[in-house]
Amino acid sequence: MSKVTDFKCLVFDCYGTLIDWESGIVNAFQPLLSRANKTDTISRTDLLKLFVQVESAIQDANPTMLYSDILTKVHSTVASDHFSVPASAEEDTAFGASIANWEPFPDTRDALRRLSKHYKLVILSNVDRASFAHTKRKLEDGAGFTFDLILTAQDIGSYKPDLRNFRFALNKVREEWGIEADQVMPTAQSLFHDHVPANKLGLKSSWIARQGSVVGAKESDLEEQGVTVTYTWKFETLGGMADEVDKQFGAA
């Protein structure tokens, strides 16, 4: 059986795994919810499911569109097509820029610092470079680590779960450090965006099953679509994974 000590590189999803993007999305929707009189009539879960439904359709149709522009278009589409209120260019643009306000989970920064002692840390994220710059500062500044490689949808020209994103990352990791795919562990919250493609490529993976997560988080949702997903490890938080890593490397 594999041990976490068998790996040399962790490939992280960012939003949902390291960053509490669901809270960020819900907060960014508040002006629209108020204007559409939806504040008390749509649940957090239903709002997030609507968000990802619209987001996925726009990403599929526009794989090279910058993520900030994807978010802007999501907001406009939700307003006009789902809430039956006029889109607001000012609100749409603010929503597109809202990544700057999305915060890390409480355990993220310390866990990344600890994990950086044992692995190369790679970001593979459905984001654009300018938006991620805000996130990078929130995660790294004063935390005692830096990411070794950052790969965005803008760099690759497609959005996860497209296998191109994972193949691109695996090739980069091999080129940079000579680390082969069997020593790379995708580490992510979203079963849909990360673990399903990891399965298809034969990669062992670590599921960070953040409590209360909605987007891409339920095995039952995938099963209803006829998709079976597996993972090698499951942790409730990234801090829990770091605890197990420290334990195994300490015993190695």
Image: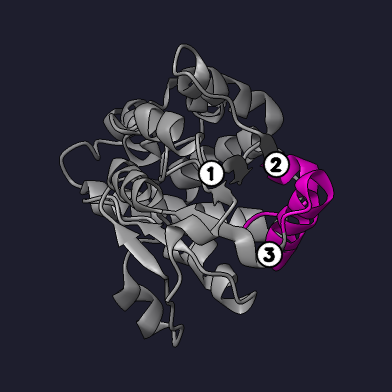
**Snapshot colouring:** one colour
Tell me if I can see residue 212 in this picture: yes
Question: Which numbered dot is residue 181?
Answer: 3
Query: At x 75% / y 41%, what residue is drawn?
Result: 154
Could you tell which of marks 1 and 3 lies nearer the N-terminus? 1
In the rendered view, tell whether residue 89 sits above or below residue 55. Answer: above
- Tell which tag, 2 or 3, sits nearer the viewer: 3
Horizontal arrangement in the rendering, residue 209 relative to residue 93 (left or right):
left
Circle 2 packing at 10 Å, graded few (<14), some (14-19), many (20+), is many
At numbered mark 3, what does the secondary structure look like: helix, strand or loop? Answer: helix
Which contiguous range is marked in magenta?
151-179
**Residue type for callout 3:** Ala
Circle 3 packing at 10 Å, graded few (<14), some (14-19), many (20+), is many
Question: Which numbered dot is residue 151?
Answer: 2
**Residue type for callout 2:** Leu
Q: CA distance from mark 2 to mark 3?
A: 16 Å
